[in-house]
Image (cartoon, rainbow, N blue to C red):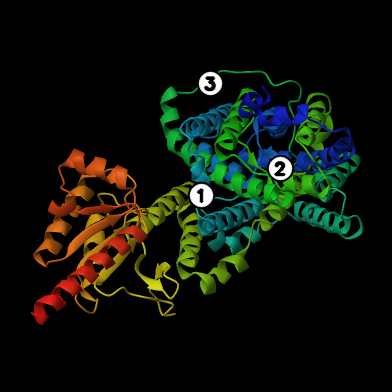
């Protein structure tokens, strides 16, 4: 019964086994998470282009849902800088300035993102956690961070951007800076000062919350709005009221692919965070269940009138640093945020936009890691170019095209690895162990036998390359080769008619040269495929052996017999 519950609701199964000594740490961690999540949720709501209360709604139900269905004990889900930047980039042009339509499009895209996650979970596509390589994700996050930072300068300096593209904004910086609104800039600088003062003297306290609260108190106490210091304005608190979209259904087509991109990127980013903290705390993460949990969390966010969520690395780090043991942390933190969202939203309307801009810039700076990208240049040049290409794509062509390119780069990287994999020539060392023949000279080729390994599954798009490579390597061998043995285990993983046709051609080529072709491994499977495709085996075709050692032993015996027979003929 517990096993079935763990499959359906891993978080609930963990909570049913809750130990009393965990409670103090979980409560402490929950208070810290709530303190950090509150200002961030409000800031990300403004980044997404919706009311501040929507940011709070995006924390409550998603956190509760993930607490029940997620497999990570430390991960906290919620609004994320990259996720919000993507949503804003997609929805803003479609909404055309209509705030209600903007909000409804945000909710629709969030629901679609959750739907894609559930579909991926149903088809066991948790492997997508490894789809976007770390270098591609590094380039993506750095590009998104720069885009957010530049976008927030208008709130910090008090001007309005005339262009929506990054390069135009940067190139027009001198003109924009002449429009600086000094009271707004002063508020931003004051927020920065309070933030770093808190970091310096009270590092364990939520600096962002205190900085934003200090700015709000000043606006309220001294009526600073009279100096044109903009605030987030009225916050529609209370329980979220479900609403049906009133926009043209045809617009949904414009959200399908961006929602898919967002689902992939959110999941990969979340898994990186979840796996790192799971490894630190000594347990495993189930990728397919995480995909389902992320999907349910996003659908829950859409139902509660919120926007898309992902794994929040900063809040997860706060949770772990304060000793959080289980997802009870998310349940308590969500409850605190819910109480504020329903009953105490009135003070939020005094929060200055400049203060939120500062918080977003600081959060985005933590995403920047140019040093890591530069270090890739010395470790793996291909990874460096992938990261740099993704970074430049986000900066030059935009967030959504950049993410699409990142997904395609991940796909092309995988295809390239499968199409042009490494291969090895195998030999035998002094102890009789089969191993690669390389510059170490620990293994030597077997006289008269050529053993070849292709390090990728064979399929129609790499069959020709396999044939070319084995013939090239065969041509480089010294001595009279009488037998070619292919290690079938890594490359013959599934039936492919193109591969089988290529194998028959290869056998014909070697037969003309008086060379016997053998496959070692997957004997029963290969015989079945040979029968289905009409390829002959044994004396009339390709030999199939159980493993490499048996194939080597049989051929060495055959070579020895041939040598003895030749010696007897010569003696006669």
Q: What element carries label 3?
A: loop
**Which residue matches tag 2?**
43
Depth order, front residue of 293/303: 293
454 left or right of 238? left
Q: Are marks 2 and 3 in contact (CB under 8 Å)?
A: no
Q: Which residue in the structure is indicated by mark 3? A: 245
Contact check, label 2 and label 1, Cβ < 8 Å:
no
> Mark 2 to mark 1: distance in Å?
30 Å
Quadrant housing residue 249: top left
Helix, strand or loop at mark 2? helix
Q: In 3D space, how far apart are the residues under numbered discs 2 and 3 (Cα atoms)?
A: 25 Å
- Residue 155: % across, % down: 69, 49
Q: Tag on residue 130?
A: 1
Disc 1 versus disc 3: nearer the observer? 1
Which quarter shows the N terminus?
top right
Q: In which quarter of the image is residue 533?
A: top left
């Amino acid at each position: 019964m517990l096993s079935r519950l763990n499959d359906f609701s891993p978080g609930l199964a963990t909570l049913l086994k809750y130990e009393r000594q965990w409670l103090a740490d979980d409560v402490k961690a929950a208070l810290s998470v709530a303190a950090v999540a509150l200002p961030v949720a409000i800031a990300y709501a403004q980044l997404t282009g919706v009311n501040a209360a929507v940011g709070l709604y995006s924390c409550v139900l998603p956190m509760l849902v993930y607490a029940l269905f997620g497999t990570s004990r430390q991960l906290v889900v919620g609004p994320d800088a990259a996720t919000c930047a993507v949503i804003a980039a997609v929805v803003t042009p479609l909404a055309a300035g209509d705030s209600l339509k903007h909000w409804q499009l945000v909710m629709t895209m969030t629901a679609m993102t959750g739907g894609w996650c559930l579909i991926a979970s149903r088809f066991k596509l948790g492997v997508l956690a490894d789809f976007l390589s770390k270098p591609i994700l590094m380039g993506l996050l750095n590009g998104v961070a720069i885009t957010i930072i530049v976008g927030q300068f208008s709130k910090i300096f008090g001007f309005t951007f005339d262009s929506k593209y990054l390069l135009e904004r940067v190139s027009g910086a001198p003109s924009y800076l002449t429009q600086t609104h000094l009271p707004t800039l002063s508020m931003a600088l004051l927020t920065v000062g309070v933030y770093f003062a808190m970091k310096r003297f009270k590092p364990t306290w939520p600096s962002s919350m205190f900085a934003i609260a200090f700015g709000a108190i000043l606006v309220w106490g001294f009526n600073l709005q009279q100096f044109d210091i903009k605030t987030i304005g009225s916050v529609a608190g209370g329980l979220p009221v479900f609403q049906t979209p009133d926009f043209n259904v045809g617009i949904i087509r414009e959200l399908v692919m961006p929602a898919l991109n967002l689902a992939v990127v959110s999941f990969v980013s979340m898994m990186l965070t979840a796996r790192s903290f799971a490894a630190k705390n000594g347990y495993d993460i189930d990728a397919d269940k995480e995909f389902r949990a992320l999907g349910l969390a996003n659908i829950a966010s859409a139902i509660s009138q919120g926007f898309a969520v992902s794994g929040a690395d900063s809040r997860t780090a706060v949770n772990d640093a304060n000793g959080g043991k289980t997802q009870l942390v998310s349940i308590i933190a969500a409850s605190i945020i819910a109480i504020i969202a329903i009953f105490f939203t009135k003070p939020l309307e005094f929060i200055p936009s400049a203060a939120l801009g500062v918080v977003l810039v600081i959060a985005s700076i933590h995403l920047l890691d140019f040093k890591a990208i530069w270090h890739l240049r010395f470790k793996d040049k291909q990874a460096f170019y992938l990261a740099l290409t993704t970074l430049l794509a986000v900066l030059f062509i935009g967030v959504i095209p950049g993410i699409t390119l990142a997904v395609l780069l991940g796909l092309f990287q995988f295809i390239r690895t499968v199409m042009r994999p490494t291969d090895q020539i195998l030999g035998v060392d002094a102890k009789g162990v089969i191993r690669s023949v390389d510059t170490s000279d620990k293994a030597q080729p077997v006289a008269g036998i050529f053993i070849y390994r292709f390090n990728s599954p064979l399929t129609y798009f790499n069959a020709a390359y396999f044939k070319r490579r084995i013939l090239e390597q065969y041509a480089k061998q010294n001595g009279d080769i009488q037998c070619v043995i292919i290690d079938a285990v890594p490359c013959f993983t599934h039936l492919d008619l193109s591969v089988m046709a290529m194998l028959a051609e290869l056998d014909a080529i070697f037969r003309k040269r008086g060379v016997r072709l053998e496959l070692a491994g997957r004997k029963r499977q290969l015989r079945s495929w040979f029968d289905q495709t009409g390829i002959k085996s044994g004396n009339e075709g390709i030999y199939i052996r159980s493993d490499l050692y048996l194939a080597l032993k049989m051929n060495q015996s055959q070579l020895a017999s041939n040598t003895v027979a030749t010696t007897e003929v010569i003696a006669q």
